[in-house]
Image (cartoon, rainbow, N blue to C red):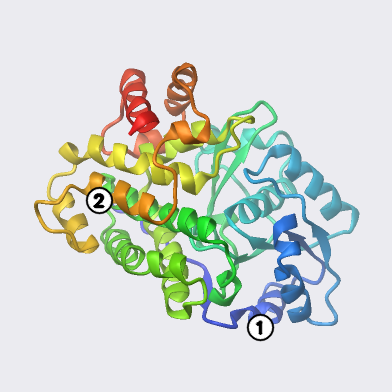
Amino acid sequence: MATILYPNHMEIDHGAISKIGMALEKNNIKRPLICTDKGIVEAGLYDILRRALPNDIDYFLFDETPGNPTEVAVKDALKIYKENDCDGIISIGGGSSIDLGKGVALCSTHDGSIGNWSVMNVGRDGVGACAPIIAIPTTAGTGSEVGGGSVIITEEGQKIVISSPHLLPKMAICDPDLTLDLPKYLTAATGMDAMAHCIEAYSTNAVNPPAAAIALDGLERVVTYLKRAVDDGHDKEARWHMMMAASEGAMAFSKGLGCVHSMSHAVGADPVLKAHHGTLNAILLPTVVRFNSPHIGEKVEKLKSAMGLSPDQDISDWILGYSVSIGLPRNLAALGVTEDMLLHFSEHCMTDPCHFANPVQPTVDQYMDMYREALTQ
């Protein structure tokens, strides 16, 4: 059985930010809350958006999105939304700002703790209508702009996944020009996030041939263009292809994700480490690919072909070398992870929805072994 859901209205091109007026009019948004973070404001990207907004739009700003969005931040933004009678959301930034905007959209029409609406509690069909969202990504990695999922850290410290067609942004404005000055490290880390999405989605057991084909196309783009984007941020061709690859990764993971994400969600929920999601995915991807390879058959060779590898090359070794070559940490120890944390992380993985989509579900002990490998690789 194949379940195929495809995507929202996308505008992808240099200068696409000019489409914001059309997006608001089409969705009858007159008083949007703009969800973003301080870095976007300081980089001048908020001003670019503000200048593109029509004169008759009353907009309000929440710029306190944390690196990993939290229920507390959602509540703070929701307060501004309600106090100003907002009727929609513009999320501009990386995946954190877009996920936070989705959290606000959900809580504007749903009462109670945000954890009540996690995939583990209500699935994809338990979430009702939400406020409309316009998503404007300023990184090329998460693909949150074309997905109906949101990852939020609850007040209890649990990193949950919410997923619903009602959280799919009404329009994604994908303007590669907004990524031209993204720092090298963030370019690398978000780009490896897109790689992880493509590889994990392709590897799942779900039957969805269009998503599988998109995953391989996105993977080829990442391998071809990510290093170019890291080496020269103003390589407009590379930036366009990475923006497309990020969106393709999210389209592909309608097939599901896997242990890279269950493991990165567990570490990312740690309030002390505050580890970046894309960086975690880059570090964990080689280990999980090695674990999954015996269980995915001919998919290994198709992944190698999309990546331009020869049949005798090892995918895991290649990914690790590529990640390090573009400036990312080699292992979890570099992020402050220690042996005594691994049991807690492994137990967290067992309740993460991505665990259940992996080609084979690891035990707690197997998660421990994978974490140990990634700790010192």
Residue extending farthest to the left is 312
Q: Residue at x 48, y 35 (%)?
A: 334
Q: Neighbour class for label 1 at 10 Å: few (<14), some, many (≥20)?
A: some
Cα gap from disc 2 to disc 1, whole angstroms: 40 Å
> Residue 52: x, y in percent?
74, 80
Specify which label sits upstream in the sequence, 2 or 1.
1
Instruction: Give me the disc on residue 318.
Output: 2
Relative to residue 86, is residue 74 depicted above or below? above
> Residue 26: x, y in percent?
67, 77
Looking at this view, is 83 or 201 the one in front? 201
Residue 216 horizontal side relative to residue 185, left or right:
left
- Amino acid at dot 1: Ser
Looking at this view, is 261 or 226 the one in front? 226
- Amino acid at dot 2: Trp
Question: Disc 2 or disc 1, which is closer to the eye?
Answer: 2
Relative to residue 56, is residue 32 depicted above or below? above
Q: Secondary structure at mark 1?
A: helix
Q: Which residue is mark 1?
A: 18
